Amino acid sequence: MVYRPNRFDFLVLLSFFALLALLARIGHELSAPLPPAGKIPISLDPRHLPEYALRSTFRMFAALGLSLLFTLTYATLAAKSRLEPLLVALLDILQSVPILGFLSFTVTFFVGLFPGRVLGFELASIFAVFTSQAWNMAFSFYQSLKTVPRDLDEAARLFGLSPWRRFWRLEVPFAIPGLVWNTMMSVSGGWFFVVASEAISVGRTEVALPGLGSYVAKAIQEADLPAVLYALLTMLLVIFLYDQLVFRPLVAWSEKFKYEDRPSEEAESWVLDLFRRTRFLRRVSAWLAEALWEAATRLEPLFHARSIRIGRAWTYAFYGTLALVFLAGAHAFYLFLRPLGFFEVGRVLLLGLITLARVLVLLVLAGLVWVPVGIALGLRPDLAGRLQALAQFLAAFPANLLYPIFAYLMARYTLSPEVFTAPLMVLGTQWYILFNALAGGMALPGDLREAAANLGLKGPLLWRKVLIPGAFPYLVTGFITASGGTWNASIVAEMVSWGGLTFKATGLGAYIAEWTGQGSPSHVLLGILVMSLYVVALNRLVWRPLYFWAAERFRLG
């Protein structure tokens, strides 16, 4: 049978070649030499906003590709190897440690790879955005791997699927719905890091990369309110476009992987419908996917045979190297922190307890608000689809732009920073709870909800017996990622400024921010170490037990 192209094929091909042209232009700009003194001009003329938006979006999706690769490798290793406790604890620390504080080190590394080129600074910016996306996606995929339904797992074993086929035929498809929603949250959360990472300083060299973040930074610096509004409107348009062109088709496509016995109600996507109406391209994509799978299948025996030997050797080498690094690092930290004394260590531990109390209270309050809202939206895919772009915009809005407003209100009405700086810590992180609750609501099988309706379960009883338990694994992921983000946000939220006034709350975040401003690496390092200590303790005492509980008690099937 001959598959001749139709008009939809030509329309999709035209869009594809337009995208290639845009990528080629960006690639040409990335390879350009750095201007003298590193000064890349940033104009507040609104005519430049489309180009800046394109550059920022490119950085966002380049980081997203790296985050997806990291997720498929790191989360799989954490879920399936003997290194699980260590890798999960390390992942929890990484999402909580203020990576922007180490941006100068990563910039030095990347700039050294491409001296005199814009590419080095671009890679440093992409890496900073990667650090805001990868942890959330990895936790989502890890949670899915640990909660694969038992009946599907038994079926895979009965059919004799190898670990390779089991991963791609069962585990990845089961993880796709939750991973798609957490990917959306990661992209939205990445806007905060885009704003911070597009203005880079290395020694005396300051580089402002063209993008929405550098545009907003310059507009705030020059107190140009219309320019800030132009940037926010452009951001809203960009979010709407990639929602329509990327994430809405992904959400609609992910519905086919929902775990239930009957076809689910599929979300609408005009882009997906357009591709489905093509004739030639659908045939070519199916042929390409089949060819890639056959090629991967041929490599499977070689991969599986070597993975066991390499895996064991790698495990021993990893532990040996880790021990050496730990001993060397402990000695270096001791020499670095010894001048501070035990009294300072005790004081910082007490400040950490205060911030810990804030984090836990804020997570409980955010959960009481967003868990029922998210699950309710997840049970109504049509409504969730209509509100999807709005939720992404609210999650993408740089919460740090609101900090001066809170500082002004505290100065105007003499409000206590101990209380009113606390909400700033959760402004940008509460969306992790909402998006994961929404994914959990959408993952609930329709036959399970029908069974609950037939049994007459309503109101609080329905939530306690069906909805909360069914979405519980997703909720654990949401609270873990929100917890890490809240710890990170405490560094900029516990000390805010307005004009010449500075409001500082008592806590570990304010301690790190204060000593960062005074340029004391020893105090900053002590604060980060104490924060990491609390994060590890919270992981071992709360989040890890909850993960095991979710995997054993609330697994579907």
Image (cartoon, rainbow, N blue to C red):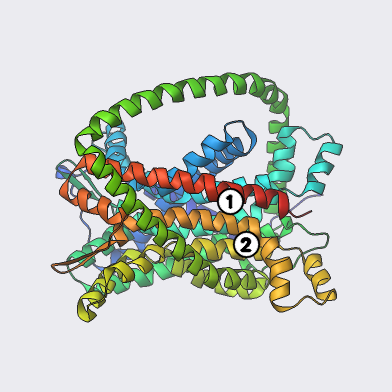
Residue drawn 62% across the image and 39% down it: 79
The answer to whether residue 76 is above or below residue 275 is above
**Does the CB distance between marks 2 and 1 fall below 8 Å?**
yes
- Front residue of this view, candidates 347 and 255: 347
Residue drawn 73% across the image and 72% down it: 462
Q: Secondary structure at mark 2?
A: helix
- x, y (%) of residue 270? 63, 68
Q: Is residue 156 visible?
A: yes
Q: Quadrant of residue 554?
A: bottom right
Residue type highlighted by circle 1:
Ser
Q: Quadrant of residue 298?
A: top right
Residue drawn 46% across the image and 56% down it: 483
Residue type highlighted by circle 2:
Ala
Tag of residue 439:
2
Q: Residue furthest bottom?
A: 413
- Front residue of this view, candidates 43 and 421: 421
Category of crowding for the residue at label 1, using alpha-carbon neighbours closer than 10 angstroms: few (below 14), some (14–19), many (at least 20): many
Q: What residue would you read off at disc 1?
A: 140
The answer to whether residue 372 is above or below residue 346 is below
Q: How many marks?
A: 2
- x, y (%) of residue 316? 55, 20
